[in-house]
């Protein structure tokens, strides 16, 4: 094959900016023809090339069709996964029941290889993953049945695709069994006024996202349940369910919003039939007040076919009795999803608008570069339930941009997620001077059974680069002899100490080879 277009978005559409209209591409129709414009939802199947292999998926999105004078019909972007922003021309019969589209109409010009694309019919050999052009087919037809338009004469092995003009080789895109139905205007769900507003702890296991736990808002009104933020990618989107006894049914599909021009929907499937779209059902336990589901909750890019970006199982919503989220030990946060930030409190104490923010790309929380001001910014955990007399270990993993541009942090704890509430220092101000993540560890006990927050305080000097955190944990510690908060800061040497002060390695460059245990090294407690 001569060249495949680069696939640059999740839905595998080509950026329209790569196509221009030089003199050698005169036949391409880029301007919208005059006439009545109608928008249809696409359904059917597509082939596309990715990573040197032929893939097959569902068609998604919409297609624009113009019905013009003289029985002319124009179809924009005739191949679902190739966005050229060009039109092909057809003719509708007098009865209005059939549209005929001639093949070999040019749809794009690639300036890099200086060649055009045209539409054509191909035969597909599944064993060899090869497409061969069928030059004998001069046109294809679309059947018009009321408001539905269906591509005729195509199948899994006989497709409408695109070819290079100079070679007639397949250019990487093809459709078959295409069906266009009038587009439904997508509208976001908004709960009505009134009703009870509650906070639930949502948990599930995402195929792409892993273990998920964060609070969501629930409104119950007029026999309906509205849930906000159940999808991490759409934290402000609501889904709506109808309450019937101890069952809540959320009809599929429900529009969540759009990312990079692609629409996303809530749908569901059952665990024993993952090929069929079904309504999502939550089952209510009146004794515990917990909602659960044995279905897959799907984040999908099509209303009518399963074309998922993620799916979630073991879905559970547990009442929090208010807005407060309380976690038990062991508490481990790896910042795998932006949604976990709903549990954290971020305080820009110096009010300079440079503060902690989530990095989706790096899956961490980052205190950014600030030229003029030193850091005074708090990343405060949710409330965590602790017991008196129990020994705990607190760990935070942090890094700077490079060792030559060090950052600084300290860690405090207290009973309120405020600056004033951070009353007890558990890690003294410490330099973070490595481009790799380092562990900063301390052990402690608490005087009474109560609920605590822990605050990572960015106190870096101005004009550094960035401070990142990708892990925080509080776990029970079985070490004997640590009876109180320890805040040792031996930073004057490179010796390795035990907790009782014995030197076990002088002028150390690492802790490799030491027995498992807790050591003091350069002012930090490290568990091996």
Image (spheres, rainbow, N blue to C red):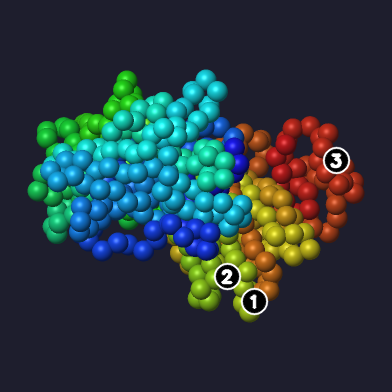
Front of the two marks 3 and 1: 1
The residues bearing labels 3 and 1 have C-alpha atoms spaced at a distance of 42 Å
The x and y percentages for residue 314 are 36, 31
The residues bearing labels 1 and 2 have C-alpha atoms spaced at a distance of 14 Å
Q: Which residue is mark 3?
A: 504
Q: Which residue is mark 1?
A: 371
Residue at the image position 36 percent from the left and 64 percent from the top: 31
Residue at the image position 59 percent from the left and 37 percent from the top: 1
The x and y percentages for residue 522 are 78, 53
Query: Could you classify mark 2 by the number of other residues whose Cα lies within 10 Å: few (under 14), some (14-19), or many (20 or more)?
Result: some
The x and y percentages for residue 10 are 47, 46
Residue at the image position 22 percent from the left and 61 percent from the top: 35
Q: Is residue 68 visible?
A: yes
Q: Is residue 142 left or right of residue 326?
A: left
Q: Which residue is mark 2?
A: 376
Secondary structure category for the residue under label 3: strand
């Amino acid at each position: 094959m001569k060249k495949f277009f680069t696939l640059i978005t999740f839905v595998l559409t080509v950026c329209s900016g790569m196509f221009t209209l030089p003199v050698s591409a005169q036949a391409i129709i880029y301007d919208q023809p005059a006439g009545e414009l109608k928008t249809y939802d696409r359904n059917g199947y597509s082939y596309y090339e990715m990573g040197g292999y032929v893939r097959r998926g569902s068609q998604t999105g919409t297609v624009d069709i113009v019905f013009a004078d003289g029985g002319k019909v124009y179809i924009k972007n005739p191949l679902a996964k190739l966005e050229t922003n060009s039109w092909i021309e057809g003719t509708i019969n007098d009865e209005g029941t059939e549209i005929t589209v001639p093949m070999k109409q040019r749809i794009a010009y690639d300036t890099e290889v200086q060649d055009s694309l045209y539409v054509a019919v191909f035969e597909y050999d599944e064993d060899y993953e090869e497409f061969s052009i069928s030059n004998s087919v001069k046109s294809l037809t679309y059947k018009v049945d009321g408001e539905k338009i269906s591509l005729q004469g195509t199948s899994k092995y006989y497709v409408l695709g695109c070819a290079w003009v100079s070679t007639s080789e397949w250019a990487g895109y093809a459709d078959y069994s295409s069906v266009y139905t009038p587009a439904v205007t997508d509208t976001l769900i908004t709960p009505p006024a009134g009703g009870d507003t509650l906070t639930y702890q949502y948990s599930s296991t995402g195929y792409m996202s892993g273990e998920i736990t964060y609070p969501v808002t629930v409104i119950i009104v007029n026999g309906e349940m509205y849930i906000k933020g159940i999808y991490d990618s759409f934290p402000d989107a609501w889904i709506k369910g109808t309450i019937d006894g101890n069952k809540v049914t959320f009809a599929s599909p429900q529009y969540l919003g759009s990312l990079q021009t692609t629409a996303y929907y809530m749908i569901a499937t059952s665990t024993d039939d993952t090929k069929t779209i079904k309504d999502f059902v939550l089952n209510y336990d009146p004794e515990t007040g917990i909602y659960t589901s044995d279905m897959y909750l799907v984040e999908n890019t099509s209303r009518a076919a399963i074309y998922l970006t993620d799916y979630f199982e073991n879905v559970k919503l547990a009442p929090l009795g208010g807005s407060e989220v309380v976690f038990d030990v062991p508490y481990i946060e790896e910042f795998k999803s932006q949604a976990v930030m709903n549990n954290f409190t971020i305080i820009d104490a110096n009010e300079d608008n440079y503060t902690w923010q989530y990095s989706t790309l790096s899956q961490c929380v980052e205190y950014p570069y600030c030229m003029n001001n030193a850091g005074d910014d708090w990343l405060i955990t949710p409330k965590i339930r602790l017991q008196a007399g129990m020994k705990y270990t607190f760990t935070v993993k942090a890094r700077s941009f490079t060792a030559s541009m060090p950052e600084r942090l300290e860690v405090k704890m207290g009973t309120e997620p405020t600056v004033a509430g951070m009353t007890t220092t558990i890690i003294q101000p410490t330099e973070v001077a490595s481009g790799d993540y380092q562990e900063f560890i301390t052990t402690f006990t608490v005087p009474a059974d109560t609920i605590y927050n822990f605050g990572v305080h960015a106190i870096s000097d101005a004009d550094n680069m960035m401070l990142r955190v990708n892990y925080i944990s509080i776990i029970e510690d079985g070490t004997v002899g640590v009876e109180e908060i320890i805040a040792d800061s031996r930073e004057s040497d490179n010796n390795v100490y035990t907790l009782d002060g014995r030197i076990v390695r002088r002028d150390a460059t690492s802790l490799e080879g030491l027995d498992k245990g807790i050591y003091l090294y350069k002012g930090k407690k490290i568990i091996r």
